[in-house]
Image (cartoon, helix red, strand yellow):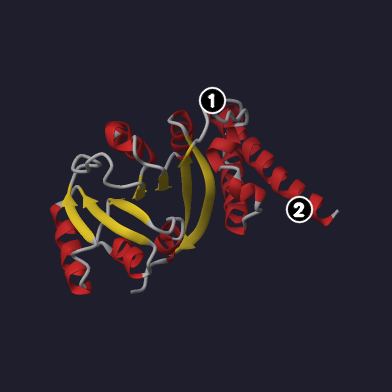
Amino acid sequence: MQLSERLRMNVSLVPYGARVADIGCDHGYASIWLVQHGIARTVIAMDVNEGPIRRAREHVRQAGLESRIDCRKSDGLEKLRPGEVDTLLITGMGGPLMIRILWEGAAVMQAVQTLILQPQSEPDEVRKFLIGQGFVPVEEKACMDDGKYYFAICARRRENEEGERWDDEWKYRYGTYLVQTRNPVLYDYLLKEKRKYEEILRNFAPEQTHAERGAELRHKINEIDKCLAQMSAGEAGEKG
C-alpha cells in the first residue's frame, strides 16, 4: 500500500505497540498501514461520515484485518470507550476542530498517553491546548505533499506536574523541535511566509502602512525573523 507523503509523515510518529484510534480515518489507509507494518497492535478507525467508514470497512476486509481494525462511525471520540486506546491519531483537519474533539473526549483522554496531530490551521492554538492539558510536544515532522506544507506534532503525557511555559509566541506558532533540528522544510516555509507578508506590505497604500493590518503583518514577520535567527544560531554553534 502506497501512502501519500503526508500520511507517511503522520504514521511515522506512532509508537511501536500502540493501541491507536485513527480519528477522521477517511479511507482507512493509515490504519491498515500501521497494522500491516507491525507498528500498531490494534486500531479503531473512526469517521463522522458514513461514506468514509464504509470505504474503510471494505479496505480493511480486503486486507484481511477485521480482527485488528475496528471501524466505527463516530463524531470525534464519541464512540470510543475510556481505556480502549493509548494513542490518538488526528490529522487533516483544522486546529479548532481538533481542540473540540479532544476537549469533548475528556473521559477518553484520561488513558491516552500519546497524541499525533497534524493540524491544517492554527497550530499555535493546538500547542497551547496540549501544554495546558498536560501534554508535551516531543517530536515534530514536516513535509511537502502536492505543493503544500504539512506539519505533524507528536505529544506525550507529562510525567510531572510542572508544565512547560513558553514566553515566545513563535514557539507556539512553529514549535521548537523543527527549529532545533533546523528542518529544511520549515526553513523554506518560513522564508516563503516572510516573502508573502513583505509583498502584502509593499502593496499597501501609504496611509495603510501603520494601520492595524500593517502592524499585524510586521509582527508576523518579526516572529519569523526570531525563528530564523534561532535556526541560524544553532547552525553557527554546531560549526563552531
Nearest the viewer among 38 and 230 is: 38
Q: How many marks?
A: 2
Q: Position of residue 219 (x, y in %)?
A: 61, 32
Q: Nearer the viewer, mark 2 or mark 1?
A: 2
Residue name at image x 20 percent, y 68 percent: 59
Q: Is residue 138 visible?
A: yes
Apparent side of residue 134 relative to residue 208 in the rendered image (left or right)? left
Relative to residue 35, is residue 218 depicted above or below? above
Apparent side of residue 77 relative to residue 221 in the rendered image (left or right)? left
Nearest the viewer among 122 and 193 is: 122
Q: Position of residue 143 (x, y in %)?
A: 50, 59
Badge 2 marks a residue whose secondary structure is: helix
Q: Position of residue 5 (x, y in %)?
A: 44, 65
Residue name at image x 25 percent, y 42 percent: 76
Q: Which mark is residue 235?
A: 2
Dot 2, crowdedness within 10 Å: few (<14), some or many (≥20)? Answer: some
Relative to residue 169, is residue 189 depicted above or below? below
User: Identity of the amino acid at label 1?
Assistant: Glu
Q: Which residue is mark 1?
A: 212
Apparent side of residue 203 relative to residue 240 in the rendered image (left or right)? left
Residue 174 falls in image quadrant: top right
Q: Position of residue 18 (x, y in %)?
A: 37, 54
Badge 1 marks a residue whose secondary structure is: helix
Task: State the separation of the CA atoms marked 2 and 1.
Answer: 35 Å
Nearest the viewer among 217 and 7 is: 7
Residue 77 falls in image quadrant: top left
User: Identity of the amino acid at label 2?
Assistant: Glu
